[in-house]
Image: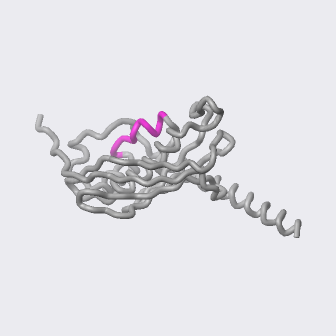
Amino acid sequence: MNDAISSDRTNAAASAEETLERWRAEEAQVRAKVRAIGVSRPEQVAGLTGMQMFEAMFEGRLPWAPIGDTLDFVPVHIEPGYAVFQGAPKFAHYNPLGTVHGGWFATLLDSAVACAVHSTLPVGKAYTTIELKTNIVRALTEQVPLVRAEGRVVHGGNQVATAEGRLFGPDGRLYAHASTTCLVFDARPPKAR
């Protein structure tokens, strides 16, 4: 019986290592395409759907948000209604108790769930988060090399959209989960110069 448990742990560890290496490779591919850190100007995104905006970011035609650089996370995959962000917990993210601050969890999860909503928006629509609920179920330290936040749209309406997300490690261990409510509204057209 103990040999079977030991074998399962070895296989799980190998699987976690393989997952970690795959995640690192995916992140390297994404980071290689980043051309600039900044905020897109309204005229750069006018006429684009939410998904087209993310495609332009992944192709290096639009800048990446500075928050990812500040807190060491990056989007690694976005498709309509689904977004995946990846981050590396660092000592710089610690709270006074010696673990990663809850704000880091919340920011990574907020990015995933909100971008899942954003990816579904048609031309001329914008959104803002009006509620974010985060449940931290396990502490994080820099001993966990990478985590991923997955966000999925639950409801995409004309005025309100909701999404859920979860934050987990390469071994599948859950660290937190979240839900969001976003207000969807008409985007302001860019001002003429």
Q: Is residue 52 magenta?
A: no
Image quadrant where one finds the C terminus: top left
Question: In the rendering, at what x and y percent does residue 184 appear?
Answer: 26, 53
Give above or below for 14 relative to 102.
below
124 left or right of 25 in image: left
Residue plotted at (65% across, 39% down): 142
Question: In the rendering, at what x and y percent does residue 156 appear?
Answer: 31, 62
Residue plotted at (64% across, 32% down): 97
Question: In the rendering, at what x and y percent does residue 136 appear?
Answer: 56, 48
Residue plotted at (25% across, 47% down): 45
Give the magenta range.
Answer: 61-70
Q: Total of numbered circles in the picture?
A: 0
29 left or right of 163 in image: right
Residue plotted at (60% across, 55% down): 174
Q: Is the image coloured rainbow, by chain, by secondary structure, or in one colour?
A: one colour
81 left or right of 41 in image: right
Residue closest to the eye, 41 or 96: 96
Q: Is residue 47 visible?
A: no
> Residue lying furthest left in this view?
192
Question: In the rendering, at what x and y percent does residue 73 appear?
Answer: 51, 43
Residue closest to the eye, 112 or 68: 112
Image quadrant where one finds the N terminus: bottom right
183 left or right of 20 in image: left
Q: Quadrant of residue 80?
A: bottom left
Q: Is residue 162 visible?
A: yes
